[in-house]
Amino acid sequence: MRVVKIFDTTLRDGEQMPGISLTPFYKAQIARALDRLGVDVIEAGFPASSKGEFESVKEISSLGLNAEICGLARIVKEDIDMAIKADVDMVHIFTPTSKIQIEHTVKLSYDEIVERSVECVEYIKSHGLKCLFSAMDATRSEFDFLRRIYRAVEDAGADAINIPDTVGIATPFRFYELVKKIREEVKVTLDVHCHNDFGLAVANSYAAVLAGADEVQVTVNGIGERAGNASLEQVVMILHSIEGIKTNIKTELLYDTSKLVERLTGVRMPPNTPIVGENAFSHESGIHAHGVLKEASTFEPGILKPEMVGHRRRIVIGKHAGRYQIKKILEDAGYSVSEEALNKIFEKVKEIGDKGKKVTDRDLFTIAEIVIGEVAEEKAVEVNEVTVITGNKITPTAVVNANVFGERKIASAIGVGPVDASLKAVLQLVGGKMQIKEFRLDAITGGSDAIAEVYITLEDENGKIFTSRGASQDIVMASFDAVIKAVNFLLTRGKK
Ligand code: KIV
Ligand code: ZN
């Protein structure tokens, strides 16, 4: 079976995305996660670009990961020396090959570019390292020059050559043809690197694999310069699920890896992002959700299941919710609902949805309890006192005093802000086994006295999920309220 290699450049091209600057500690954390994920190569950075970058590449090289560690360098001896000093396994050298870039950047003749590239490959190989050669802006370069330079570096001993679509102007059909033509010219590992300026980075990478590419350069969440690079998750799942082409990626770690990169880079993915977006396997519409609850592949691809990528299917209650869907959610939570009660609950959910509000699980259960007559709510946690301290030069700290299943407990935590501190204190109070999966804050009215509405999705150690809402003029208390409701549900009804 064909296995395509995954060359990850999240820590190099991904980090070049405007607004991202990862500390060496965060870079090492991402490198470990990429290694667990199973990428073949980690491009750790551009060692000659700064002292900090050099240190960080060196640290990643010292982690003893299974993936090969690669460092970027121009076709300049000093750059290559820095990569060698950073102890990388592979040096990735690049030079522009298009007329426009040659004229405006390196100002060398075509002959000089070929000569220097060959010398650099030989220099890297003489140090016993692997060498990847990139003809930057390949998709705007003359084919004859590409052929000449790729053949020259292959003869000089390059282990792999890369075809970068540097400004993202390739289209799948044209890129397929280009990769195929180059495939006929060289025998070494053929790699591609696609940018997403027209939203075609994934499609172009896919086309390249069909044309014979052995390796694809990708980034987690598709982060990268301008509109980004090809997304690792999407390329891998297309190859895996649609084409039956293998990679060494442990696909069930895709969601968690994506979330880690989101958290550490601060770049949040829109909910409709394929594979890893929060809505990738969420269903709200009545007819769809009804079908999915009976047989998931009615309204999902089937060849792509949430568990394959470590994600989960979510049925979201909203104004499109169907009776069957509501009944199933309630029954899963331990309620037994008659047809008559279900009709009343259904009408109420529609009413709230029509007012433009999101109906949380908590709302649904409250409605159900009122309708069914089970108003008495079991409370695992009864809060006696909450103290939250924040201010200039004060570490935000929260202390919660509460009865947990009747036993008095006190927990405290610090956080990046008062909300973070109070949520952490509550989670500590209940043994630290729950985690917040989603936090959303909406201001309902304008002004500094606006009512804040907070939605919190909490997950317990068994993977049971619950979303609740808190509302107050004080965002700390709105958040606190929401998390206590969710904790209470998961510790009582969530167990059923
Ligand atoms: O986009 C590009 O051409 C690059 C090269 C360094 C491969 O990132
Ligand atoms: Zn790039």
Image (cartoon, rainbow, N blue to C red):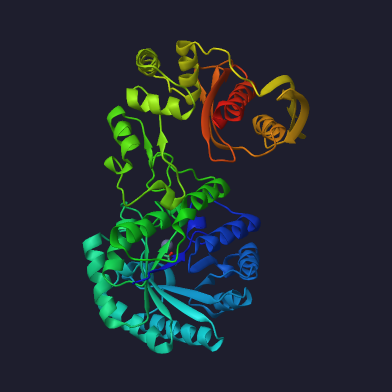
Q: Nearer the viewer, residue 450 or 348?
A: 348
Q: Is residue 457 left or right of residue 320?
A: right
Q: Residue at x 27, y 41 (%)?
A: 298
* Image quarter where ligand 1 lies: bottom left
Position of residue 151 in the picture relative to residue 89 (left or right) = left
**Placement of the N terminus among the 4 image quadrants:** bottom left
Count how many numbered circles sit on residues in the image.
0
- The vertical placement of 9 against 409, above or below, is below
Q: Is residue 124 above or below residue 442?
A: below
Image spot of residue 91 (x, y percent): 51, 76
On the image, the x and y values in percent for residue 354 come to 35, 16
Quadrant of the snapshot with the C terminus: top right
The x, y position of residue 363, in whole percent, is 48, 19
Residue placed at 51% from the left, 86% from the top?
A: 125
Q: Is residue 403 above or below residue 26?
A: above
- Does residue 320 appear in the picture of this structure? no
Rendered view: 203 above or below 406? below
Where is residue 100, by image quadrant?
Answer: bottom left
Q: Residue at x 58, y 70 (%)?
A: 48
Residue 437, x across and y down, in percent: 54, 38
**Does residue 474 appear in this view?**
yes
Where residue 384 sits, quadrant-wise, is: top right
Q: Nearer the viewer, residue 307 or 359?
A: 307
